[in-house]
Image (tube, rainbow, N blue to C red):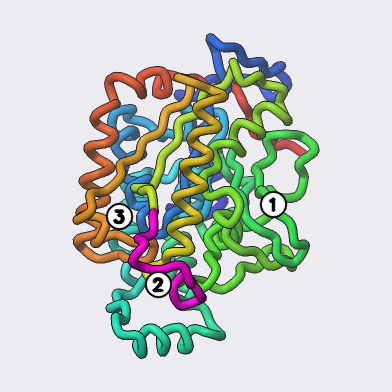
Amino acid sequence: MGGAGKLRDVLTRDQPAHSIKEKMTWSPEQPFQSLALTGGGFRGLFTARALQVIEEKLGSPIGRRFDLTCGTSIGGIVALAVAFEVPMKQVVDVFETDGESIFPSHEPPTSKLGKGYDLFKHMNRPRYSSEPLRAAITKLIGADAILGDALHPVAIPAVNVTQGKPQVFKTRHKAEWDRDWRFKAVDVALATSAAPTFFELALVDGNLYADGGLFANAPDLLAIHEAEHFFNVSVESQRVLSVGTTTKSYSVSFAAGRQFGIEEWMEDQRLFSVTISSQQQFVEQLVTHRLGDRYFRIDHEPSQEQAKDLGLDVASDVAKKTLIALATKATTDVLGTRLVPYLSHEPKLQLIKEG
């Protein structure tokens, strides 16, 4: 992928030629269509592969079929790639080749002593360096590219821990939003994916940020709110395609007891698994209630055997093969049925480039 200047010159001939000044309106027949991409660490390879399958069917970038793309954490990185028209095949390739640099393989300790030592070793520092993640992102989007270079509207949640508030980074798809478009895309990507204990806090415009998954790991509701609140689009005139990361329900055995401390909650990433799973299930329920059949989610819960090979920071060859296979099957199953209206959509929401 070239630099920011090259991105500005990308031709988008098959996009509908709506004027910026044209009044944008949506209806049940011509809805505001959003793409929502869930967080989930390396399991985001499932998301990228699902979108690659769709792009191969379309023969064109998937960003040209959505008014807005929202993504959190790894989903935020993929969402930015969508907004910059990075081919999803390239995203999949980078995830596969750089995965073990970002998440070096390691054997989780099994003994009580080993678990205690592992906790102590990472007591005052994150488990992984952010530099391999930054390097992977800049293979997809130029190091100097800014949000203003994006070709399609995008919204990326993160937690501003300097201000103590959630924040959503946005392209300038509304005239008064005249700040975020100046930020480097790679910095925004690192902000939304700065998972506590995994990576260091990200720095954007003098403020520190943590992973957007802390409050919006499934950004489906964010997409609906963006359309409803800022563009006066009724829920009846909205449609959302959501893509998961092999989200599975997470439960705790009674054999584990009830006296959970730091060690128990951090074991096997219990705390993160409960947070991701419960958020996703709750959001899916709420959005289904609001949108009904105008909401569709591509995901696949792994089997008990497959789940042993997957994890937020597991980038092994077996994990890659499993995620690719699950995404391919889950997506091809619905390409000619449930996905048809999503893939024929012509978006109206425009980016504001002048001024």
Q: Residue at x 42, y 33 (%)?
A: 62
Q: Is residue 30 above or below residue 330?
A: above
The C terminus lies in quadrant: top right
Q: Is residue 207 above or below residue 275?
A: below
**Considering the numbered disc 3 on the image, is that residue within a helix, a strand or a loop?**
helix
Q: Residue at x 69, y 53 (%)?
A: 166
Cβ–Cβ below 8 Å for labels 2 and 1? no
Q: Is residue 131 above or below residue 177?
A: below
**Label 3 Cα crowd, 10 Å radius (few <14 / some 14-19 / many 20+):** some
Q: Position of residue 135 (x, y in %)?
A: 45, 67
Nearest the camera: 338 or 191? 338
Instruction: Give the alpha-carbon distance from disc 3 to disc 2, as whole Å.
Output: 31 Å
Q: Residue at x 77, y 34 (%)?
A: 175
Q: Position of residue 45 (x, y in %)?
A: 34, 52
**Considering the numbered disc 1 on the image, is that residue within a helix, a strand or a loop?**
strand
Judging by the rendered image, the residue that carries numbered circle 1 is 167
Task: Tell me: 307 left or right of 35.
Answer: left
Residue 120 appears in the figure: yes
Q: Amino acid at mark 2?
A: Glu
Q: Position of residue 134 (x, y in %)?
A: 49, 66
Of the two numbered discs 2 and 1 on the same chain, state the one appearing first in sequence: 1
**Considering the numbered disc 2 on the image, is that residue within a helix, a strand or a loop?**
helix
Q: What's the mark number on residue 93?
A: 3
Of the two numbered discs 1 and 3 on the same chain, state the one appearing first in sequence: 3
Q: Is residue 187 above or below residue 351?
A: below
Q: What's the mark number on residue 267?
A: 2
Q: What's the mark number on residue 43?
A: none
Choose mark 1 or mark 3, whichever is in front: 1
Q: Which residues are magenta?
A: 251-265
Q: Residue at x 32, y 65 (%)?
A: 314
Cβ–Cβ below 8 Å for labels 1 and 3? no
